[in-house]
Amino acid sequence: MNAERPTRRSLLRTAGGLTAAVAMAGTGVVAAAAPAGAAEDGFGLRIVERNESDPRMWYYRFATDAIGWNPGVNVLLPDGYHGSGRRYPVLYLFHGGGTGADFIEFDRLGIRALTAGRPLIVVMPDGGHAGWYSNPVGSNTGPRNWETFHIAQLLPWIDANFRTYAEYDGRAVGGFSMGGFGALKYAAKYYGHFASVSSHSGPASLRRDSGLVVHWANATSAALDLGGAMVYGAPWDEARVSADNPVERLDSYRNKRVFMVAGTSPDPVNWFDTANETQVLAGQREFRARLGEAGIPHEWREEPGGHVFRPGVFSQDLDGILARLRPA
């Protein structure tokens, strides 16, 4: 399958003169007045809160029919963005799951320092506590259509309001844990959107071990997000599972940079760490084997430790992302 590279669009606007927006990790968010030329509503998104006081991190919160509450996004700009007049490649970076997981996760993990001096915009949106980067089969808590929010709304909104390359070679997608799965899913399902995909301790095989990952996605989404409904339903929506399953979408990873990492030694006394990373490692090994059999190039790492974000590996991944994408 050859990469179909979309034509570069002209809907982009220069955003010089904007000050930055930020949702500070671990602090309350205070909405700042929008300066002239600030980002605008569009693509089904209405800005209800913003903070534009930081030189690099811009924060927005939206009202959208896709989600039953107002999801947020942090947009991390490269050094010198305001005065450069240049366009930049974009990394969409997705957080993991859990009751404390949200769009500020990577700010807590040091994303500003990790990207300092790198000519790259990083977009970090909400994905729900257990949204699984999907439009669920059902919901008892109102709309939770994360796939619609990310792909149909946020992605074109970013291209319309920031100096990006709105094309295949201008975008990468990555994430940690549940977000690593979301990155693999979106890269395959929306083939022409992302030229690079990175999964940091993200599951890559949904059906192995009697569908353990699907069962986990259903259980966590029912408990944390959907009020008892499930992302894949019961019985499963089999077509949806197959559409989301990286090991069933091998041809959709051709002509992309594919990177993944998993831990080899989770904490034996921590059931959560052991269960998560053991399954992640096994699934990534299966996925890597199938990619190899299909002749699809990929990069991978196995590192000591368990289900954790590895800043050093992420920094190396960033180098690979920038080498693959169109330069600023």
Image (cartoon, helix red, strand yellow):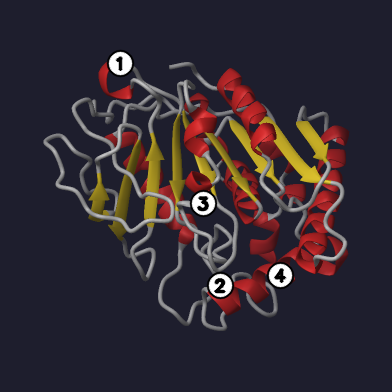
Q: Which residue is mark 3?
A: 105
The reply to whether the C-beta atoms of the residues labelled 2 and 4 are less than 8 Å apart is: no
The residue at 29%/42% (across/down) is 21
Circle 3 Cα neighbour tier, 10 Å, few/some/many (<14 / 14–19 / ≥20): many
Q: Which residue is mark 4?
A: 216
Give the alpha-carbon distance from disc 3 to disc 2, as whole Å. 27 Å
Q: Which mark is residue 137?
A: 2
Q: Which mark is residue 263?
A: none
The local secondary structure at tag 3 comes to helix
Q: Does 313 sit above or below residue 102?
A: above
Give the alpha-carbon distance from disc 2 to disc 1, as whole Å. 45 Å
Label 4 or label 3, whichever comes before in sequence order: 3
Tag nearer the camera, 3 or 2: 3
- Of residues 118 and 42, the one nearer the viewer is 118
Label 4 or label 1, whichever comes before in sequence order: 1
Give the alpha-carbon distance from disc 2 to disc 4, as whole Å. 15 Å
Q: Amino acid at mark 2?
A: Val
Label 3 or label 2, whichever comes before in sequence order: 3
Residue 11 in view, yes or no: yes
Label 2 or label 4, whichever comes before in sequence order: 2
The local secondary structure at tag 1 comes to helix
Tag nearer the camera, 4 or 3: 3
Q: Amino acid at mark 1?
A: Ser
Q: Amino acid at mark 4?
A: Trp
Label 1 or label 3, whichever comes before in sequence order: 1
Q: Which residue is mark 1?
A: 84
The residue at 34%/20% (across/down) is 80
Query: Based on the displayed image, in which of its 4 quarters is residue 260 positioned?
Result: top right
Label 2 or label 1, whichever comes before in sequence order: 1
